[in-house]
Image: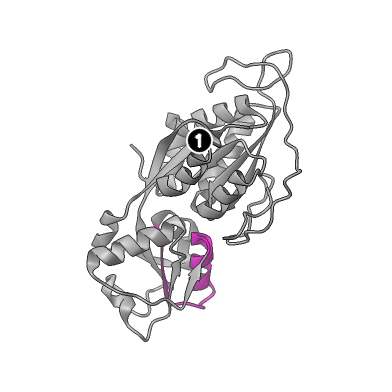
Amino acid sequence: MTRPAPRTRLSRSAGAGAAVLLVLGAATACSSSADGDEAGSGSGSASGKLSGTVTVFAAASLTESFTTLGERFEKAHPGTEVTFNFGGSDSLAAGITSGAPADVFASASPKTMKIVTDAGDAAGTPATFVRNQLEIATLPGNPDSISSLKDLTDSKLKVVLCDKEVPCGAAAQTALDAAGLKLTPVSYEQDVKSALTKVRLKEADAALVYKTDVHAAGDKVEGVDFPEAAEAVNDYPIALLKDAPNAGVAEAFIAYVRSDEGQRVLADAGFLTS
């Protein structure tokens, strides 16, 4: 299992699949007073405003939507900074349990969140904030006329899946089992962005990814729905981490993600919201 990529500032997103050793000695800015605004208590100046850096480890499929949410959160709370580490949920969980400094974990499945909670590294009970569903990503125009999950078993097609330990890979296996199909991909990728990139670069004919990733790719890929996807819907939990360097701002960010405005941003990105 690989380690997550280094933390990135809001203006930059971590490269998909670039899970590398974290520098565990990195520090996160934190100050001392509490804030009583709508999003919860946080660190701040004497005026009581939220301030400081909050570090969010988030599933790769959240890259675009969380980047938007981070920008809006910073605008609403001048003096705060949101940094993200996007990657495969299993790698992120491994980093957290190994001591990587982080405030928030947003996972693409309860199973990978459980790695963190079982290690005693979460503060409180994680809350599901969105759900996601699979879609087949094909080349623009769908030149291979893929219309079903069964079509992916054609030996002439180069198909990519996420690794089975990654939530999108586990969901793909659940969908294939529901259809009674066996599929041997040309590669297993460490996160959903890496799987989609194989199609975008024409190194694969199709990939099983999330609807949100097809949506984010725009006209660079084409999405194909399939009924078995309904059997493999992933819940996305989010949690404050036990040793969060800036717990107050972290709580405020989590509250913002779960707010009406946060849910609208996520729904616009293609996530299923309650």
Q: Is residue 12 above or below residue 193?
A: above
Q: Nearer the viewer, residue 11 or 248?
A: 248
Instruction: Estimate the x, y position of residue 180 in percent, counting from the top left.
Output: 23, 70
Drawn side of residue 166 relative to residue 156, left or right = right
**Residue at 47% in and 60% down:** 218
Instruction: Estimate the x, y position of residue 97 in percent, counting from the top left.
Output: 59, 45
Q: Is residue 113 above or below residue 197?
A: above
Residue 203 lies in the magenta stretch: yes
Q: Quadrant of residue 235?
A: top left
Drawn side of residue 131 relative to residue 219, left or right = left
Q: Where does the magenta region start and end?
A: 190-210
**Residue at 71% in and 13% down:** 47
- Quadrant (top left, top right, bottom left, bottom right) of the N terminus: bottom right
Question: SS for tag 1?
Answer: strand
Instruction: Estimate the x, y position of residue 7 in percent, counting from the top left.
Output: 68, 48
Residue 89 in view in this figure: yes
Residue that label 1 marks: 239
Name the residue furthest bottom: 156
Q: Quadrant of residue 244?
A: top right
Amino acid type, callout 1: Ala
